[in-house]
Amino acid sequence: MKRIIAIVRPEKLEPVKEALFAASVSGMTITQVNGCGNQHGWKEYFRGTEVLLNMVPKVRFEIVTDDAEVQRIVDVIVDAAATGQVGDGKIFISPVEEVIRIRTGERGAGAV
């Protein structure tokens, strides 16, 4: 099993979520997050004073899936989230050693 973490623009929340549902992704966790990458935020002026906003709002999708589904899900996320501009986000893929469903104690892929 693998964990896919996708960090995308906030305005891409609904398009990515709908694309994942259309692709039959059975479950995901979505969180509002802040961070910075290469762009390191931007400058704005508030009441005449320059303010550096170095934490950019993003949306984090987290999905655990079978190894065979990873590329398909990544393709769905990229297609729905890409604008071609700096700040589109990143996708991280890592192995998952074990999954346990708390309610039943079921383990492995069946618990996802």
Image (tube, rainbow, N blue to C red):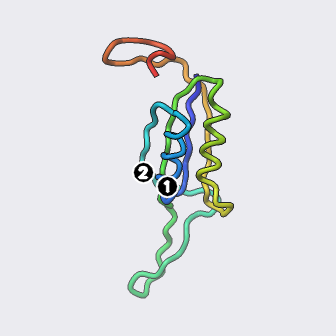
Q: Residue 32 carries which label?
A: 2
Q: Quadrant of the N terminus?
A: top right
Q: Residue 50 carries which label?
A: none
Residue sitting at 59 percent across and 53 percent down?
A: 81
- Label 2, secondary structure: give it: strand
Front-most of residues 42 and 106: 106
Name the residue type under label 2. Gln
Residue 97 found in image quarter: top right
Front-most of residues 107 and 20: 20
Residue 87 in the image, given as x and y percentages of width and height:
61, 60
- Label 1, secondary structure: give it: strand
Local crowd size for mark 1, using a 10 Å CA cut-off: few (<14), some (14–19), many (≥20): many
Residue sitting at 68 percent across and 61 percent down?
A: 84
Residue 34 in the image, given as x and y percentages of width and height:
47, 55
Q: In this view, does 91 lie above or below 97?
A: below
Calculate the distance from the C-alpha at mark 1 to the C-alpha at mark 2: 6 Å
Q: Give whichever of discs 1 and 2 has the lower sequence position.
A: 2
Front-most of residues 1 and 75: 75
Q: Which mark is residue 58?
A: 1
In the image, taking residue 9 as reference, residue 31 lies left or right, namely: left
Residue sitting at 41 percent across and 81 percent down?
A: 46
Residue 85 in the image, given as x and y percentages of width and height:
66, 63
Residue sitting at 64 percent across and 49 percent down?
A: 79
Front-most of residues 28 and 58: 28
Marks 1/2 in contact by CB < 8 Å: the verdict is yes
Name the residue type under label 1. Lys
Residue at the limit of the structure toward the bottom, as seen here = 48
In the image, taking residue 42 as reference, residue 31 lies left or right, namely: left
